[in-house]
Amino acid sequence: MSDPFIRHIQLLGFEKRFLPSQHYVYMFLVKWHDLTEKLVYRKYTEIHEFHKALKEMFPIESGQIEKEHRTIPHLPAPKWFDGLRSTENRQITLADYCASLLNLPSKISRSPHVINFFKVRSDDVNPASNKNGRKPETFLLKTESTKQANVSDITGPIILQSYRVIADYVKNTKSELGVTAGDVVDVVEKNENGWWFCQLKNKRGWVPAAYLEPLDSPDESEEQDPDYAGEKHIITKDYSSTLDDELDVKEGETVDVIHKLLDGWWVVRKGSITGYLPAMYLKKSGEAFPADENQTKTKALPPRRSTISNARSMHQQSRKQITQDTYRRNSKKYLKERQSKTESMITAITIDEDKEMESHCKAQPAIPPRPSKEVILDRCTEHTKSKIRTMN
């Protein structure tokens, strides 16, 4: 059996923790020789101590004998006090350091010193919990291209939301995460297509949103209210309904999205008919296809929340659901109101046009008759009258 070695190290971001006192730890996703991925957390002071020991073990490669022979990358010393800004700014340096470290000769990159430092520890799997209930604040590094990244690419602070699993889910692909009812996962990313990227201890992967509910309250508050005016979307792929409340559509058709649900199945209106459609088959009118279009086409449809038969909610009041009859009734009501408003506007415009035509068609006033010579002379001044007499 070959010795273990590290294939890749990716910096995911950092966490602000509060136990035993406030401090920061960096999150690394370590990919090992057997393609397993492990999540580890390290303080910057630990990383710098590791770096100092590495230089002592390899004095030639660290440049201690001849500076021009140095191949081990530089790493700045920690500050007397590391705050949020310094921790944030240091991420790009750390990401580049790890990449350079693995590109060194195998006697360094695969040395026991490197292997042991990035092995999973017990506190990586079960970090100390705060008795006051204050959760760590997680700051994620968005970009995967750390060479071209800058500080503006870093988000924060965001606190990862915890959700409880309401039913067992067996993963179907390597990118998914299998979970059991009662598990508590942290949601890293919520995708509108109904697949959420979650973390369970040191495992990460995609989980259908239909299998998750927040710890505090049922999740109907997270979903937007129905908008019966609708938002124009274009069908990107043919879909044949499998349940009575779903719609049959063809690629290129236009529909109105009236309710976006978290499980990735949206309520849409086609003409005057409403029904469910998978969000991953919809594209907002006027927008380009997403960058991960190919992944979307190959990814399986997420299960609908209503199809999970063994779902067990922890809440006394179950999640409220709007029936399809309610959607259709409210949608028809909206369409009638919109039609009546349109007809009223047309009537008002017609009346205004008729009034305008009437004003143009009214008889013009007659030309007044020319006054007689006597009347003109009577209205003239004495000066004008004298001139007229002289002309006569």
Image (cartoon, rainbow, N blue to C red):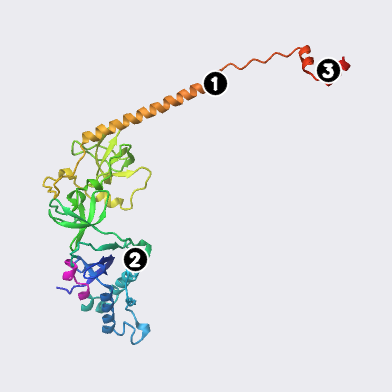
Quick one: 338 or 106, which is closer to the camera? 338
- In reply to whether residue 116 is colored magenta, the answer given is yes
**Which image quarter holds the N terminus?**
bottom left
Q: Which residue is mark 2?
A: 146
Which is more foreground, mark 3 or mark 1?
A: 3
Image location of residue 286, percent across then percent down: 38, 44
Circle 2 residues within 10 Å: few <14, some 14–19, many ≥20: some
Instruction: Report the residue marked by disc 3.
Output: 385
Q: CA distance from mark 1 to mark 2?
A: 73 Å
Q: In the image, what residue type sits under mark 1?
A: Ser
Identify the element where label 3 is drawn.
helix
Q: Which residues are magenta?
A: 115-126
Q: Residue placed at 26% from the left, 79% from the top? A: 49
Going by the image, does 386 lie left or right of 91? right
Among the two numbered marks 3 and 1 on one chain, the one whose residue lies closer to the N terminus: 1
Mark 3 surroundings: few (<14), some (14-19) or many (≥20) residues within 10 A: some
Identify the residue shown where x is 17% and y is 64%: 131
Q: CA distance from mark 2 to mark 3?
A: 103 Å
Q: Position of residue 67 (x, y in %)?
A: 37, 84
The residue identified by callout 1 is: 359
**Residue occupying the far bottom of the picture:** 65
Q: Amino acid at mark 3?
A: Lys
- Give the percent coordinates (x, y) of residue 241: 21, 38
In the picture, the disc for residue 267 is: none
The furthest residue to the left:
310
Q: Residue at x 28, y 31 (%)?
A: 332
Relative depth, front residue between 363 and 131: 131
Compute the Cα span from label 3 to label 1: 44 Å
